[in-house]
Image (spheres, rainbow, N blue to C red):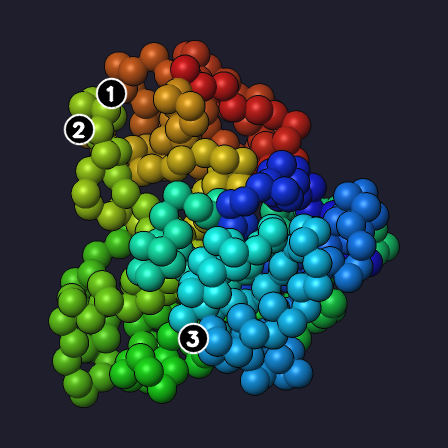
């Protein structure tokens, strides 16, 4: 049974009758199609829309294969419009249609319609679409299940786990359909199949002119090392050490852009805490889902502390924070979380196992003069707050039992 993803629906619902084009972006298989179906169900049940006034097209359904150009799609939709009443048009994985932006622009200008589209490309709103429809789109970034959504799905479907639920989520991630599988091999095989589909369809297709073998080696290295310190030169050195051909940093940056466009990673900038300004340098990459880190690793052994940092980053994004890596003159803070011109500072640790670890994590804030709230998140159950720095249990934070305060 599906869960209602109310966090997204509550945001989209306000725009059901808006003339803005509603654009849902996110990695393949993260649940965009389900949300689109839930929107359709709400239009029928709560919005009292006639079924005849909803036009739904899934471009990954083979029966719509012929609608692969903007002219064919436009003609198909216009034939469905029979009167002057409002029509709701839901187009799933719109990037399969060449020059789709022309259809959206024309329909918006000439028909009484409310348009919803999904796409598996973070730059869906760039290029021609941006120029044709600047200021006329509202984007909603869809992510895999958060930990709270994951638990809701388990409970609703009466799924019992052999292992601790948080450990299971950290290791295998929150891609919705991976919960249909029980053993590790099947789960990892499923996540690998998603990754391979993204690479083959969205990145290394016939139009990209990208060497698939080279891309896979570099991409898997980047994703398997998500949340770690990043250096393009270290990627170059890794590749050239184990391969006969040479690459340079330009290739690495190009592949990073492709991974970001396919919504597989987020690239995070640094924030200079003392000067309170964003820096151009990108410090780290985070995987959109922990399952991809496991699937791209050479072994099934992944470092829990890096998975924790990755999960916290994605949860902060889900909760609407703008997230940066904090730079101090002595080092760095894991995250600076910002919202509405306010912020807080966050350190993430696995366990505060002894006094030296406690001193390292809490001491990371010593050089910060900014009075904004400071937090240490770990898996410890005992409250270790001290010196005005708040300690929060990670599971309680992920479940929304503990909130962050900003100033």
Dot label at residue 329: 2
- The nearer-to-camera label among 3 and 2 is 3
Q: Which quarter of the rendering shows the C terminus?
A: top left
Q: Picture coordinates of residue 262 (x, y %)?
A: 42, 65
Whether the residues at callouts 1 and 2 have beta carbons within 8 Å, the answer is: yes
In the rendered structure, the answer to whether residue 308 lies left or right of residue 92 reads: left
Say which residue appears at 33% left-offset and 66% top-offset.
258
From the image, tell me which residue sits under label 1. 367
Residue denoted by label 3: 98
Question: What SS does tag 3 mark?
Answer: loop
Q: Marks 1/2: CA distance? A: 8 Å
Q: Which residue is drawn at 67% across and 54% down?
A: 84
Identify the disc placed on residue 338: none
Gap between marks 3 and 1 measured at Cα: 53 Å
Q: Residue at x 62, y 80 (%)?
A: 64
Camera-side residue of 175 and 7: 7
Vertical comparison of 72 with 391: above or below: below
In the orientation shown, which residue stands out farthest toward the right? 158
Query: Comparing marks 3 and 1, which lies closer to the viewer?
Result: 3
> Image quarter for residue 373?
top left
- Give the image location of residue 85, x and y in percent: 70, 51
* Residue for point 16% across, 76% down: 247
- Image spot of residue 309 (x, y percent): 45, 44
Provide the secondary structure element on which disc 2 rests: loop
């Amino acid at each position: 049974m599906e869960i209602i993803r109310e966090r997204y629906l509550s945001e989209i619902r306000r725009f059901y009758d808006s003339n803005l084009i509603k654009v849902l972006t996110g990695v393949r298989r993260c649940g965009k199609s389900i949300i689109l179906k839930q929107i359709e169900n709400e239009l029928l049940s709560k919005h009292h829309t006639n079924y005849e006034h909803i036009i739904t097209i899934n471009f990954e359904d083979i029966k719509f294969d012929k609608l692969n150009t903007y002219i064919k799609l436009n003609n198909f939709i216009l034939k469905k419009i029979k009167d002057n009443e409002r029509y709701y048009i839901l187009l799933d994985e719109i990037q399969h249609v060449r020059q789709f932006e022309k259809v959206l622009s024309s329909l918006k200008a000439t028909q009484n319609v409310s348009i919803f589209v999904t796409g598996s490309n973070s730059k869906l709103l760039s290029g021609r679409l941006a120029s044709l429809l600047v200021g006329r789109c509202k984007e909603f970034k869809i992510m895999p299940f958060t930990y709270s959504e994951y638990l809701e799905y388990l409970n609703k479907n009466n799924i019992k786990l052999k292992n601790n639920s948080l450990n299971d989520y950290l290791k295998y991630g929150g891609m919705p359909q991976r919960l249909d599988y029980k053993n590790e091999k099947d789960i990892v095989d499923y996540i690998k199949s998603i990754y391979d589909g993204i690479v083959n369809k969205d990145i290394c297709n016939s139009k990209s002119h990208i060497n698939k073998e080279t891309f896979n080696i570099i991409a898997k290295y980047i994703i398997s090392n998500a949340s770690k310190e990043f250096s393009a030169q270290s990627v170059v050195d890794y590749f050239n050490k184990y391969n006969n051909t040479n690459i340079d940093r330009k290739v690495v940056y190009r592949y990073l852009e492709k991974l970001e466009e396919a919504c597989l990673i987020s690239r995070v900038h640094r924030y200079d805490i003392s000067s309170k300004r964003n820096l151009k340098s990108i410090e780290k990459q985070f995987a959109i889902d922990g399952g991809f880190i496991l699937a791209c690793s050479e072994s099934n052994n992944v470092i829990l502390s890096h998975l924790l940092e990755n999960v916290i980053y994605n949860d902060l994004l889900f909760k609407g924070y703008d997230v940066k890596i904090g730079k101090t003159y002595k080092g760095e803070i894991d995250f600076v979380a910002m919202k509405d011109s306010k912020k807080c500072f966050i350190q993430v640790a696995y366990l505060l196992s002894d006094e030296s670890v406690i001193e390292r994590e809490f001491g990371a804030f010593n050089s910060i003069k900014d009075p904004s709230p400071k937090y240490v998140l770990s898996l410890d159950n005992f409250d270790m707050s001290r010196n005005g720095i708040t300690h929060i249990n990670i599971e309680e934070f992920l479940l929304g039992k503990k909130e962050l305060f900003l100033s």
